[in-house]
Structures are given as structure tokens and as C-alpha cells.
Amino acid sequence: MKAIVKRKPEKGIWMEDVPIPQVGVNDVLIKIIKSAICGTDLHIYKWDEWAQRTIKTPLIIGHEYVGIVAEIGEEVKNVKVGDRVTAEGHIACGHCRNCRRGRQHICDHMVGIGVNRDGGFAEYVSVPFTNVLKINEKIPDEIVSIMDPFGNATHTALSFPLIGEDVIVTGAGGPIGCMAIAICKFVGARNVVGSETSPYRRELAKKMGADEVIDPLQEDISDAMNRLGMVSGFDVGLEVSGSAQAFNDMINHMYNGGKISLLGILPNTTQIPWDKVIFKGLQMKGITGREMYETWYKMEKMLLSGLDISPVITHRFHVDEYQKAFEIMEQGNCGKIILNWD
């Protein structure tokens, strides 16, 4: 089969012919229809410090996809050949303390598809049946292919109550920030303000429903607050930028008792004004992946109830044009990019 492989420990990825994966008794073989490029895939492509620490080559990358069940192991009962499915990208052990208390997303022995084992940038991928999800047929293939990052956005946004609240989103124009904005407005947030340095992505954040989107290099968050008639700070903060400066700006503009979801990976050198965190009584929650599988339930029900995240998909390529797709990702003038395997 064709697969996009991180063959060598250097910048780049390569299309190669590799064997179709074997299917164990508890596995499901999925024939890929569409894949989506994630920021993690870009890190692997660029071979940055995180990738060098984490990735063992050779590796088929990719963990966002939709496909058709092509084969099932003899113990698999939850899906059948021909079903359209996607998969939870984190494989939990099922036996550690966190797994046994229903917190599989922070499993002690987590394995990431497309990071720690071969992934879905291929004609076929094999995954454990416990990770396979059959999504309602009313939801289009393209949307199903981005359920993984949509789940990150859902986990981030819905970690705290949002009805009537004022929300600040840093890194608002990235795909997860954009989807988080749409979720916040959908569930009843009052004002949603985005902070984003990219002009292209500021426009994308506006399309996704942000009431105001500022360029933090040119404008202060308080200017947007004034335009919206806000007299206090933000009730909820969603940090998806990974920028220390953006995070500190968020803390400075939080209302007393505010709550912050932290998805962006901040530099280890980040200086946090702990006096403000303490005296404002702020709550902070680290976000990783999706809460299995409650987040997936919420994702599907929001989509079936009218939430529209389709504007976040900005580019589509045949998989043979993967190099062009990654170059656009590296430039940053895009939302989600879909690779078609048909």
C-alpha cells in the first residue's frame, strides 16, 4: 500500500510502498478515505526538538482520518466490514488506575497513533477495536476526518460552564482555536474575543463566530473589551497558542474567579505571574486529547444539533500532492487541510 512515512531523522516526509498492516484478533483494518494534517504532523515533518525527542523512525504518521472497515479480528463485535468509521487517536492500556476510574485520556501507558505506532496517512491502518468509532451518517466524511482535533477543541471549551460567560481565546485562528470559538458561541457564551497574530487566521476566526479578534502585536485585549462594553475581565480563558506572552496577557485580563483551559504547550521558560493567579483565585486545567468517550458523545450531538465547523477546512488535495499541502501548513495561511485517498 501507499503510505506517507517519516523515513529519516531529518526534515521531510516521503511517500513509500509498505506492507498492509496485519490484523490481530482485537483489531480493525480501516481503508482510508480522507486524512487531515495536524499540527503534530507538521512538527514531525519539520523534525523540531519535540519530534527528535519523541519520534522513532521509520514511522507512518497521521492520526486524523475517516475510512471504511475492510477487515475485523475474530473478537471484534462493535463494527462490521463496510461501516464508515474514525478512531480515537490515543490507545489506553485499560488497566492502570486512571483507565479503571474512567480517565483513559490520561492513561499511564498511553500510545499515540501516528506518533508512537504507525498511523493513518496510508491506504490502510490497523487499530484496536476499542478505539474505533462509528459516526452518524448525517455527518459528512470531511467533518468525520477532523473529529480528533474537534475533540481537542470540545474538551478545551467545555471544561468549564460557558452560558452567558465572556471568553478569551489565544491562538484563536488556528484550527483548534477556531473550532473552540464556534463551540463557545453554539453553547451560549456571551462575548468571545480572539487573539491571533496571523491576518489570514484572524479572518478565519471571525468566520467561526468570534465577536472580536485582535492582533496582539498591534492592539491590547482591553480595546476589544471596551468595544464590547465589558466592564470586568473574562470569565473563561482558552489557551491554545502555546505563547508565553499570550498566556500572560490572558491572566492579566481574567476576572476574579476565572477559569482557564490550557491546551497550548507553553515553553519551559514561561514566567507566570503567580501572585495574580493566586489573588484572583483563578482555576487552571491542563487539557490533553479527548475525555474518552464523553467528549466524543458531545462532539457528535453538537454536530447533529446544528454546530457548523466546516469553514475551518480551507484546503483539499489529493494525497499525491502531500508535499504541497505540508508546505502550505508550514506557511500557516490555512485552516485544516484534507488529503483525499480516493
Image (cartoon, grey):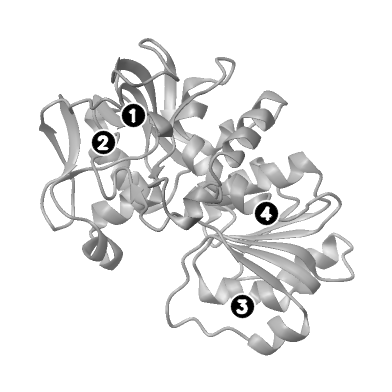
Relative vertical location of residue 134 with respect to residue 289 in this rendering, above or below: above
Rate crowding at label 2 as few (under 14), some (14 to 19) or many (20 or more) other CA atoms within 10 Å.
many
Res 159 label: 4
2 and 4 marks in contact (CB < 8 Å)? no
Label 1, secondary structure: give it: strand
Q: Which residue is mark 2?
A: 322
Tag in front: 2 or 3: 3
Residue 18 location (% of width, % of height) = 10, 30
How far is mark 1 from mark 3, CA to CA?
38 Å
Name the image quarter holding residue 269: bottom left
Label 4, secondary structure: give it: loop
Residue 69 location (% of width, % of height) = 35, 17
Label 2, secondary structure: give it: helix
Type of the residue with mark 2? Tyr
Q: Which residue is mark 3?
A: 248
Q: Tell which circle, 1 or 3, labels the residue nearer the N-terminal end.
A: 3
> What's the residue at 47%, 71% (across, down)?
266
How far is mark 1 from mark 2, CA to CA?
7 Å
How far is mark 4 from mark 1, CA to CA?
34 Å
Residue nearest the observer in this picture, 217 or 317: 317
Tag in front: 2 or 4: 4
Rendered-image quadrant of the C terminus:
top left
Rate crowding at label 3 as few (under 14), some (14 to 19) or many (20 or more) other CA atoms within 10 Å.
some
Q: Which residue is mark 1?
A: 317
Is residue 146 among what the camera can see? yes
